[in-house]
Image (tube, rainbow, N blue to C red):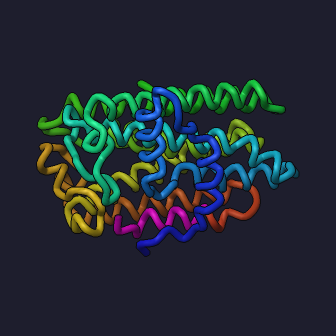
Amino acid sequence: MSELPYDLREINRLIGEYLPKTGGPQETVIRAMDEAVENGGKRIRPALMYETCRCFAAACGEEEEQWINDIAPFMAAMEMIHTFSLIHDDLPCMDNDTMRRGKPTTWYTYGEGMGTLAGDGLMLEALWLVGKSAADSENPQRAARAIEILGEKSGIRGMLGGQSVDVEQTGKPLDDNQLDFIYRLKTAALIEGSLMIGAVIGGATTHETEIAERIGENIGVAFQIQDDILDETSTEEELGKPIHSDQKNQKTTYVSLHGIEAAEKEVLRRSEEAKELLGEFPGDTERLAALIDFLINRKK
């Protein structure tokens, strides 16, 4: 399975509505921001958020128009934060990558300074967006909790914290515990946050939100291990970015510690556990299960 089993047109439409409009003296940085978000991508995080919210909102009897209006700004904010992390990940001071999704990276197109600002701009635009959404929300307590989750999972307790440890430990041998910490924070945290925010905005209980977090951790770690596998087995044409970058940057990965076969088994184990936990979600979870299956078998 190499293509996402999901119609992304509605997801892309909702995200597009919240991208900043170009124009004015700061047009260059806005254009760089918008192009980075619009440059393909699987939209896994907003799709997971949307589908999780749909499950819980439908169970609570909420009108579709209302819950979509409530979740859409958080979907856009999550994709902005994810894209900001990719822009900065590609910078010369980090991975020094010149290709992303088959196209030149932001810094390579606009220069290192403007690329850095584009990443900063997406992060801050996401903050403005969810703050405005909470102020306008008919469910301000849910929105406030969602903002808390977004901050936790994207900051030092989540994605950024994991990235900082990854940068600090590059070139050094890691054990399983250290690698698991990096994977859980650097990659899994935003996926956890996506499911948790979808659940919270949809009206989930605290226990159900904790289940969403556990599902997200399993999906996220499996996603990162699959990335490790593809970095070793795919081609640059198929992947849309340089291969063997982990080896080039002297990074310990699950594959380098355990080998391809063990890595594939761990992806399957975590993915199956995530799908089993879906049984505790209300309503129809078929599309969520299909998204998890895609992550197991994706080729890019």
Question: Where residue 273 sits in the image (x, y, percent)?
Answer: 51, 58
Query: Relative to 204, is 26 on the left or the right?
Result: left
Which residue appears at 35% of the width and 33% of the height?
Answer: 162
Which residue appears at 51% of the width and 62% of the height?
Answer: 292
Examine the rendered structure and indicate whether residue 280 appears above or below residue 193.
Answer: below
Q: On the rendered image, what quadrant is the C terminus found in?
A: bottom left
- The part of the image, by quadrant, that contains residue 126 is top right
The span shown in magenta is: 288-300
Q: Is residue 130 magenta?
A: no
Give whichever of 18, 146 is nearer the camera. 18
Look at the image and tell me whether residue 208 can be seen.
no
Examine the rendered structure and indicate whether residue 167 appears above or below residue 183.
Answer: above
In this view, the residue farthest toward the bottom is 1
Number of numbered discs visible in the structure rendering: 0
Question: Where residue 125 sits in the image (x, y, percent)?
Answer: 54, 30
Judged by its main secondary structure, the magenta piece is: helix
Give whichever of 149, 15 is nearer the camera. 15
Question: Where residue 251 sits in the image (x, y, percent)?
Answer: 17, 44
Which residue appears at 82% of the width and 46% of the height?
Answer: 66
Q: Is residue 291 magenta?
A: yes
Q: On the rendered image, what quadrant is the N terminus found in?
A: bottom left
In this view, the residue farthest toward the front is 24
Look at the image and tell me whether residue 110 can be seen.
yes
